[in-house]
Image (cartoon, grey):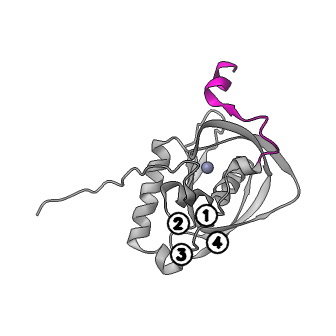
Amino acid sequence: MTARIVRPAIRKVTVLGHPVLRKVLRKLRPEEIRSEEMHRLIEEMAVTMDEYDGVGIAGNQVGEDLSVFVMGLPKGNKRHPDGINLTVVFNPVIKPVGDEFEEDWEGCLSVPELRGMVRRHKKLELSGSGLDGKPFKKIYEGFPARVVQHETDHLNGLVYLDRMDGLKTLAYMSEMGRRG
Ligand SMILES: [Zn+2]
């Protein structure tokens, strides 16, 4: 018998213009969440996120009409030294906590090369299901809360451009880098 190691495939990331990015994605049942196929997809999403240097990736960004996102950032990142634990969330729902907002730059694997300033809730409660299909709630604040909002938007057919207060801060990363 020959042992065969199947590595998770790196998926092609959908970019703006692909209709799946504008869909409200399908919610998943616990038995679907627990399936082997789903766990294979999650591995593929995670390796794709790494390959593209993303902090989060949503189901429709790999072409799937499925309400799920993966997020994660290793500790020691220059801008966000605390990083974000690798997290998988199915059927996420967000409830803002308090009425504070924060503005910061966002980019998106589906809107390559660009950055824009987006106002987001500073703190929120995330409800969803984990890999075991069981529901959970968790409070997020600051940068991880921003990522949760960005990814949950994807699952509702929205991208960060829809959340900008106008497009005047929209900029090419290459140009931003040149100007420090
Ligand atoms: Zn995005």
Label 3 neighbour load within 10 Å: few <14, some 14-19, many 20+:
some
Label 1 neighbour load within 10 Å: few <14, some 14-19, many 20+:
some
Would you name the residue on which mark 4 appears?
136
**Would residue 88 be visible to someone looking at this image?**
no
**Are the residues flagged by discs 2 and 1 in contact, CB closer than 8 Å?**
yes
Which amino acid is tagged 4? Phe
Q: Position of residue 165 (x, y in %)?
A: 82, 45
Quick check: 102 above or below 180? below
> Looking at the image, which residue is at 49% across and 58% down?
63
Q: CA distance from mark 2 to mark 1?
A: 8 Å
Q: Earlier in the sequence, mark 1 or mark 3?
A: 1
**Would residue 124 be visible to someone looking at this image?**
yes
Q: CA distance from mark 4 to mark 2?
A: 22 Å
> Looking at the image, which residue is at 39% across and 69% down?
37
Label for residue 23? 1
Label for residue 133? 3
The residue at label 4 has a CB less than 8 Å from ligand 1: no
Q: Is residue 163 left or right of residue 57?
A: right
**Are the residues flagged by discs 3 and 4 in contact, CB closer than 8 Å?**
no
Q: Position of residue 114 (x, y in %)?
A: 64, 36
Label for residue 65? 2
Q: CA distance from mark 4 to mark 1?
A: 25 Å
Q: Earlier in the sequence, mark 4 or mark 2?
A: 2
Which amino acid is tagged 2? Asp
Q: CA distance from mark 3 to mark 4?
A: 9 Å
**Are the residues flagged by discs 1 and 3 in contact, CB closer than 8 Å?**
no
